[in-house]
Image: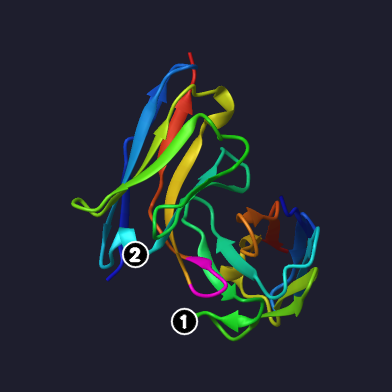
């Protein structure tokens, strides 16, 4: 199985900050990497697919980059509604998720 | 409009069985890639099983031999038969439709809670 490792596990940032979450795969997965946002008590929401394709309706402050084994999700200017947990997920083989990154607003 | 509605969750004793259902609308289950993903209380997301168009099935090692995924074309419904349940299977179970190439989980149901406890 391909292991996905996210860092950090949690972070606290202020409104307006630029936030970056990284995700590392245990082997090369090309661009088969998706990012999800999950708010407490809610269903996960797809933000970015194929490493860098922003889903329709997702604010442009979210962006994704990377290929191979190293990927990142960036929020260019953190907003209060971005308080959530973010997960990466590889679809190169049987799906696996990262452990999640909890973003808290300072 | 794509909709996924899970049902069948509940409280079951260790060693027991449960069958989850996921009724789909707005698309045809049999021609799509479908998965079950679970989330234990306060924990992260874990892929459980997939049923791909053509009937190929896949399972996470943690459930292989105990869980069976299947679909009913006449009801446009996805199922997860769960046997020999363990406390560590306690979770919210989501069904999800995979789309795209490479695939992603774009559509999710609202989830159904399975609690394994005596």
* Image location of residue B50, percent across then percent down: 48, 51
Q: Is residue B7 magenta?
A: no
Mark drawn on residue B31? 2
**Residue A80 placement, left or right of A23:** left
Q: Residue at x 68, y 55 (%)?
A: A100
**Residue A101 placement, left or right of B99:** right
Magenta stretch, residue numbers: B100-105
Residue situated furthest top in the rendering: B118
Q: Residue at x 44, y 16 (%)?
A: B13
Q: Quick one: SS at disc 1?
A: loop
Q: Callout 1: residue from which chain?
A: A
Between A15 and B114, the one lying in front of the other is: B114
* A77 to A5, vertically: above or below: below
Q: Quick one: SS at disc 2?
A: helix
Mark drawn on residue B113? none
* B11 to B114, vertically: above or below: above
Q: Residue at x 53, y 30 (%)?
A: B65
* Image location of residue B32, percent across then percent down: 38, 64
- Asked which quadrant contains residue A6, the reply is bottom right
Is the C-beta separation of discs 2 and 1 under 8 Å?
no
In the picture of the structure, the residue carrying the numbered disc 1 is A57
Q: Given this view, does label 2 or label 1 mark the residue nearer the observer?
A: 2
Between B27 and A15, the one lying in front of the other is: B27
Prevailing secondary structure class for the magenta stretch in the rendered image: loop
**Residue B63 placement, left or right of B68:** right
* Image location of residue A21, percent across then percent down: 76, 68
- Asked which quadrant contains residue B30, the reply is bottom left
Q: Callout 2: residue from which chain?
A: B
* Image location of residue B105, percent across then percent down: 50, 63
């Amino acid at each position: 199985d391909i292991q996905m490792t996210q860092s950090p596990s949690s972070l606290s940032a202020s409104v307006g900050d630029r936030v970056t979450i990284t995700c590392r795969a245990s082997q090369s997965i090309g661009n088969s990497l998706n990012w999800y946002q999950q708010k407490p008590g809610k269903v996960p929401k797809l933000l970015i697919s194929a490493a860098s394709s922003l889903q329709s309706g997702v604010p442009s402050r979210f962006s994704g980059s990377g290929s191979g084994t190293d990927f990142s999700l960036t929020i260019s200017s953190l907003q209060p509604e971005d308080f959530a947990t973010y997960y990466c997920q590889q679809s190169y083989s049987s799906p696996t998720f990262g452990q999640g990154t909890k973003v808290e607003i300072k | 409009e794509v909709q996924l509605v899970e049902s069948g969750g509940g409280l079951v004793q260790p060693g027991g069985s449960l069958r989850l259902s996921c009724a789909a609308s707005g698309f045809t289950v049999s021609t799509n890639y479908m998965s079950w993903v679970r989330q234990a209380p306060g924990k992260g997301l874990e892929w459980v099983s997939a049923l791909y168009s053509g009937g190929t099935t896949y399972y996470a090692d943690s459930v292989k031999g105990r869980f069976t995924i299947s679909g009913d074309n006449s009801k446009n419904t996805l199922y997860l038969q769960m046997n020999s349940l363990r406390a560590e299977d306690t979770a919210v179970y989501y069904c999800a439709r995979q789309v795209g190439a490479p695939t992603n989980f774009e559509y999710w149901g609202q989830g159904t809670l399975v609690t394994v406890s005596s």
